[in-house]
Image: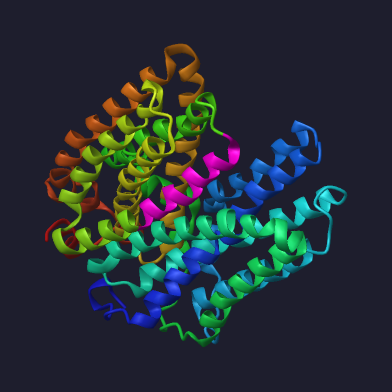
Amino acid sequence: MTESATPAITTSRWLLLGSLYVTQYFGPGFFLIALVAILRESGAALEMVSVVYLLGLVWALKFLWAPWVDRWQSRQIGHFRAWLIAMQSIMILSLLAIGRFDPVRDFWVIYGLCMLLSLASATQDVAVDGLAYRLVPPKERGFANGLQAAGGLLGNLLGAGGVLMAYPHVGWAGCTLILAAGTAVSLVQVLWFREPVHPPHSGEGARVFKRLWALVLRPGQRCWLTMILFYPLGVSLGYALITPILVDAGWSLDRIGLAVNVVGSLCGIPAALLTGRLIRRFGVQPILIGAAVLQVPGILALALPLVGATGMAPVTLAVGLFFFCYNPVLAVLTTLMMHRSDPASPATDYALQYSLYMLFSIVAVTLGTAAAGQIGYMGVLAVAAFCALAMAPLAMGRRHQESGQDSPDQDASPAVTLVSPQAQIDLLTP
């Protein structure tokens, strides 16, 4: 089935994609926050606490096994449906098993199970992206990626926020049971879902380094590589400063968690969904430019507590505005990642591009925090705002690079063709 022949997506399939994007963040979101807090409260050494954050690296490395998700398929169960059933089952069983152990006394057992949970969650994300590529028509990909960003925020809000708030009342085992039950909702939806049959492929297009060369490293792809790495640089630098700024302003960790995990997520969800609808209405190009410029007020809003506005109202406004201005960047960038994926290896292509973005963002967050010690918070915010504004000219020039005479896709062989000319026209114009 070609991209142009993809039928309109039904409401039940939108609900399925949204549910999967939410529940895959339940477990990882909870453990990255709760396990750290419980360990420190119990007097665990910082060396032990620090290894918890390594769970997040699994998501950044998912491109390494994404080709297997593209290549291995079941004609009876469905290509991506089979992967989703397997990963959902592993996540549920892992959560039930984790609840049987003590987080301090049995830390390394729980850590191993959490690593398995993160691996299953990241693999599910690869499969969901591949499924979304197959199900969602090109014109609807903007909304699909807005839904993905919103789902991640809602999953983090419920897992790292809601379930963590229930911990004092239901305990460790109760929290893991809630997480397992929430994840099971998506499994039931997947079991009822019937994936459309797609023509099998040889898997040649799913080789990691071949796809990496075709997507971002081949001569002529510098504009897109620059976009992946530097388009979100401004907000990444700004995000690195939120917690240190609030700690220095005298905020307690629970108030910071409320401002960032709850208020930030609640402001980011409508922004992500709105961005998806705007892409559907106006096309990618104008939203790409607008999202670059929109980063600036969100970044500058973080200066409010630096000038003495450290009360609940101004800080909530600053954090809320930052998240509202940040999520359009993610939604439009991931839409373009999906747009540039090949039908023969959609999960691999999307995972490769997203992993590059994630790895560079981690580096930017680290460097931004370190730079604040040299040039101050205001200095880093000024650099972040400049980087965000500098992306607008690059976004403006992208239309010519995508549809102009020097596009690298023109001489690509069928094995590495990124997207059809008609799909480019469909997405870059209203």
User: What residue do we see at 50% from left, 73% from top?
Assistant: 80
Residue at position x 20%, y 41% in the image: 395
Q: Residue furthest top?
A: 374
Please identify the dominant SS of the magenta region.
Answer: helix
The quadrant of the picture occupied by the N terminus is bottom left
Front residue of this view, candidates 167 and 133? 167
In which image quadrant can residue 85 be found?
A: bottom right
356 above or below 111? above
Q: x, y percentage for residue 6?
A: 28, 77
Instruction: Judge whether residue 30 is colored magenta.
Output: no
**Looking at the image, which is closer to me, 349 or 406?**
349
Rendering coords of residue 329 (x, y %): 31, 46
Residue 210 visible in the shown view = no
Q: Where residue 341 sits in the image (x, y, percent)? A: 35, 58
Q: Is residue 256 magenta?
A: yes
Residue 138 visible in the picture:
yes
Task: Write the start and end of the magenta stretch as one range.
Answer: 252-269
Residue 371 falls left or right of residue 325 = right
Q: Considering the image in quadrants, where does the C terminus appear?
A: bottom left
81 or 184: which is nearer to us? 184
Looking at the rendering, which quadrant does residue 143 occupy?
bottom left
